[in-house]
């Protein structure tokens, strides 16, 4: 009996140590820790195991959303068995974000709405704000910008009240994104610049890369191509943070600019990089956007054979996205009516 208790205590201490340092660790280190933990008896009953899985999920979301979803769903299963509400709601919010990255907006809305209700029940302001933000992203995905702005404003108020710098920075970025989409470029630049200014205090740096990408898009929309190239190159050369999603966006953005400038060979090169990056993480929308500019650039460069092939592939992506979108819109309005 004493030996069993000692083993359990060792596992508890070990898992607690993992949970404390997990946020600062790389994916490979976290995976190594997970492989070690799951060899221990009773690991499924430890709350720290759930925390580790949630940290792994967070690390994976923007590079490999499938893996991010896998670890979050496993964390939710363990948290539910343990009746660990905080770990469960964190896992649900990670799942909501993972579905959003994959473009599965209806699935994201369902789980995010459940996460919001649970976070309200346990009075977890941090996760409440994250759930509000995730729901705002779903509205954004459906181009309901007024509703999205309302959600992000609510989330920002919650995170400001608890002084959570990371989530505040994310909400500032999301508001900038909304105003960019509605053509209010002055407000967009204001919020995106604020996000960049607050990001260093979070030690996350992801938002800075995202904000530079969006500022690049804003500059492109205003036909300030020199500024757009400067922002996108900042993303590709940013040493403090990089991920596949931001790389795909920056390359696609540079391809658009170089196509507009008539520099078709550069446009082709960046569009190909953007497509490969998006395809590697199964981000259909980003892949389709890259293919569209790639086909146009190949045609403008006189390579009609490859232009046709990419145009056909682009249409396949569009058809797939449209089919999914129809199903999601139906599900979305059913959820809205409920």
Image (spheres, grey):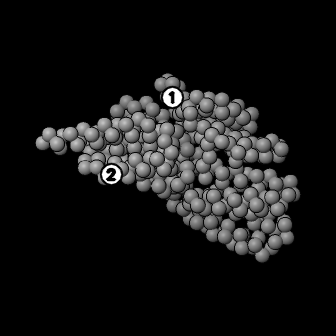
Q: Residue at x 60, y 37 (%)?
A: 205
Position of residue 158 in the picture relative to residue 117 (left or right): right
Q: Is residue 290 above or below residue 52?
A: below
Tag 1 residue: 164
User: How many circles with numbers are drawn on the protein?
Assistant: 2
C-alpha distance separating marks 1 and 2:
32 Å
Rendering quarter of residue 87: top left
Secondary structure under badge 2?
A: loop
Position of residue 142 in the picture relative to residue 215 (left or right): left
Q: Is residue 298 above or below residue 207?
A: below
Q: Looking at the picture, how far across and down is residue 125, in whole percent? A: 43, 30
Q: Is residue 96 visible?
A: no
Q: Residue at x 56, y 65 (%)?
A: 323
Mark 2 crowd level (few <14, some 14–19, many ≥20, 10 Å Cα): few
Secondary structure under badge 1?
A: loop
Residue 38 is labelled as 2
Residue 68 is labelled as none
Sequence-earlier tag: 1 or 2 = 2
Q: Is residue 162 above or below residue 272?
A: above
Q: Residue at x 64, y 33 (%)?
A: 195
């Amino acid at each position: 009996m004493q030996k069993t208790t000692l083993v359990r205590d060792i596992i508890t201490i070990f898992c607690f140590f993992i949970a404390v340092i997990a946020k600062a660790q790389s994916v490979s280190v976290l995976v190594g820790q997970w492989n070690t933990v799951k060899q221990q008896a009773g690991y499924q009953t430890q709350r720290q195991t759930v925390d580790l899985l949630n940290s792994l999920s967070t690390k994976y979301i923007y590079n490999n959303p499938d893996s991010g979803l896998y670890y979050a769903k496993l964390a939710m299963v363990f948290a539910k068995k343990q009746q660990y509400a905080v770990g469960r709601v964190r896992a649900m919010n990670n799942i909501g974000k993972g579905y959003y990255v994959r473009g599965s907006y209806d699935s994201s809305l369902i789980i995010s709405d459940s996460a919001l209700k649970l976070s309200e029940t346990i009075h977890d302001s941090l996760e409440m704000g994250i759930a509000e933000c995730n729901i705002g992203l779903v509205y954004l995905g459906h181009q309901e910008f007024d509703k999205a702005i309302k959600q992000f404003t609510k989330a920002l108020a919650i995170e400001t009240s608890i002084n959570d710098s990371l989530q505040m920075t994310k909400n500032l970025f999301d508001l900038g994104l909304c105003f960019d989409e509605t053509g209010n470029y002055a407000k967009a630049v204001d919020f995106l610049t604020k996000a960049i200014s607050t990001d260093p205090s979070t030690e996350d740096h992801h938002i800075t890369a995202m904000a530079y990408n969006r500022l690049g898009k804003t500059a492109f929309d205003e036909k300030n191509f020199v500024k757009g190239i400067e922002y996108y190159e900042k993303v590709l050369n940013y040493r403090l943070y990089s991920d596949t999603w931001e790389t795909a966006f920056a390359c696609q953005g540079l391809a658009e600019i170089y196509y507009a400038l008539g520099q078709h060979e550069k446009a082709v090169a960046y569009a190909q990089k953007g497509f490969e990056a998006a395809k590697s993480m199964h981000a259909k929308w980003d892949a389709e956007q890259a293919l569209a500019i790639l086909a146009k650039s190949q045609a403008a460069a006189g390579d009609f054979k490859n232009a046709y092939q990419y145009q056909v592939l682009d249409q396949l992506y569009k058809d797939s996205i449209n089919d999914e979108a129809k199903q999601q819109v139906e599900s979305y309005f059913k959820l809205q009516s409920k």
